[in-house]
Amino acid sequence: MDYFLSEDQMMIKELVRQIAEEKVVPVREELDEKEEFPWEIMKVLAQSDLFGLFIPEAYGGLGKGCLELCIAVEELSRACVGVATTYAANALGSYPVLLFGTEDQKKKYLPEIASGKRLVAFGLTEANAGSDAAGIQTTAKPDGNEYVLDGTKQWITNGGEAEIYTIIAMTDKSKGARGASAFIVEKGTPGFSFGKKEKKMGIRASATRELIFDNCRIPKENILGKPGLGFIVAMRTLDNARAGVGAQGVGVAQGAFEEAVKFARQRIQFGHPIISFQAIQHMLSDMATEIEAARALLYGVARYIDSGAKEISKESAMAKLFATDMAMRVTTNAVQVMGGSGYMREYPVEKMMRDAKILQIYEGTNQIQRNVIGQVLIKELAKK
Ligand code: COS
């Protein structure tokens, strides 16, 4: 379907597709097997200015929006969600600075992020705080001109590899969600180290690691926004980033669908290519229809966000929810169409199905997305 993308948007799509075909597809299986961080690919993305896509021109970026970022993430995900996660998590980690940074903070960090010189990670999740984002235990205590951070963050994408971390910590535990604050912490700060590197079901090229803060002192000026604003920083960051997870869903589903079609045309059973059987055609038809429906919703939501709309929680949650549940169904059905071959590591759909699963879980489980949508629906109804 034609989404009437602008010339610039088409150029981004073609550029990322070319990088994905030439640099990602040939190595994705090996990166997955070895659980290896895709530094070489990140360098190529940096050379192509793709880290600056969503950063304003004033800070060295290309000044594009959510739709362009989604297009780039979709194309990378069509090839490998592990690589796409590394790239998208960089945007996730950057949003707190983009949305809440002071002019000084933006001038200091955004040009380095835009050039791809320094990777970013977002640190919210902890052992006892995932869906319950306000349940974090990491503390940040003011002490003179510094804050002292103590605690452990868990399952942090780009952990260990990133150099800039946007961290949510409690400055006043007695206030619950309103006692959290957001900070910038740089790799190499004394008292900041990395713990366990996770071994995952999918997205194995991406790094997922613990962040440990032990009497970690950071300058007071590293706070993002005001003390007590940390929960809002986290929620607004997720509101802006969740469409990107939807883009991962659309991309991986598209990749799996194309593999299934290719296979169905070649695979002969009962003397005919299996694509000639109605059972297979119906599966492919459902897959194609669902992908297009998710893409239409995703691009619509991305355009809505780019319009400058203030209330985007419901829409971004809808794009994430719909596109990632779709991705799980489509990748599972791609394996089904390909039968025994689909289950083998020799074909990419086995990895795609494993990779798709995380999309229903991270940046808020799809159950949490339904909570977010439900809360906004109730508020909207109350206004009528
Ligand atoms: N934008 C701005 N403000 C928001 C907001 C948003 N998207 N969502 C909530 N708030 C505000 C609320 O208005 C409320 O403000 P008041 O104290 O003034 O009333 C405050 O934040 C607390 O909100 P709420 O009571 O809804 O918080 P809950 O603890 O019930 O949590 C959910 C709400 C479940 C939506 C939140 O915890 C969440 O998104 N969890 C998932 C987190 C996640 O995605 N984790 C994955 C790891 S991060 S990659």
Image (spheres, rainbow, N blue to C red):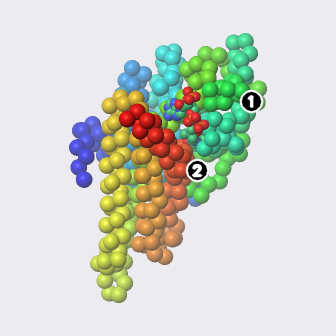
Q: Which amino acid type is shown beneath numbered disc 1?
A: Asp
Residue where numbered disc 1 is placed: 150
Q: Is residue 66 visible?
A: yes
**Mark 2 or mark 1, whichever is nearer to me:** 1
Work out how far the residue at label 2 is from the one at label 1, CA to CA, in angstroms: 29 Å
Residue drawn at x 34%, y 65% as measured from the top left: 286
Q: Quadrant of residue 283?
A: bottom left
Classify mark 2: residues with Cα within 10 Å, few (<14), some (14-19) or many (20+): some
x and y, in percent, of residue 28 in the image: 49, 55
- The residue most toward the top is 144
| Element type where label 2 sits in the image | loop
Question: What number is the disc on residue 279?
Answer: none
Q: Secondary structure at mark 1?
A: strand
* Dot 2 or dot 1, earlier in sequence: 2
Relative vertical location of residue 330 with respect to residue 241 in this rendering, above or below = below
**Residue 314: percent from left, percent from top:** 43, 40
Quadrant in which the C terminus appears: top left
Direction from residue 87 to residue 122 in the image, left or right: right
Q: Nearer the viewer, residue 15 or 271?
A: 271
Q: Is disc 2 in contact with disc 1, using a CB cutoff of under 8 Å?
A: no
Point 67% across, 26% down: residue:
175
Q: Quadrant of ligand 1?
A: top right
Q: Residues within 10 Å of mark 1 (few under 14, many from 20)?
A: many
Horizontal placement of 34 versus 79: left or right? right
User: Quick one: 177 or 264, which is closer to the camera?
Assistant: 177
Q: Return the residue at label 2.
A: 36
Q: Amino acid at mark 2?
A: Glu
* Outermost residue to the right: 215
The answer to whether the residue bearing label 2 lies less than 8 angstroms from the nearest atom of ligand 1 is: no
Tell me if residue 54 can be seen: no
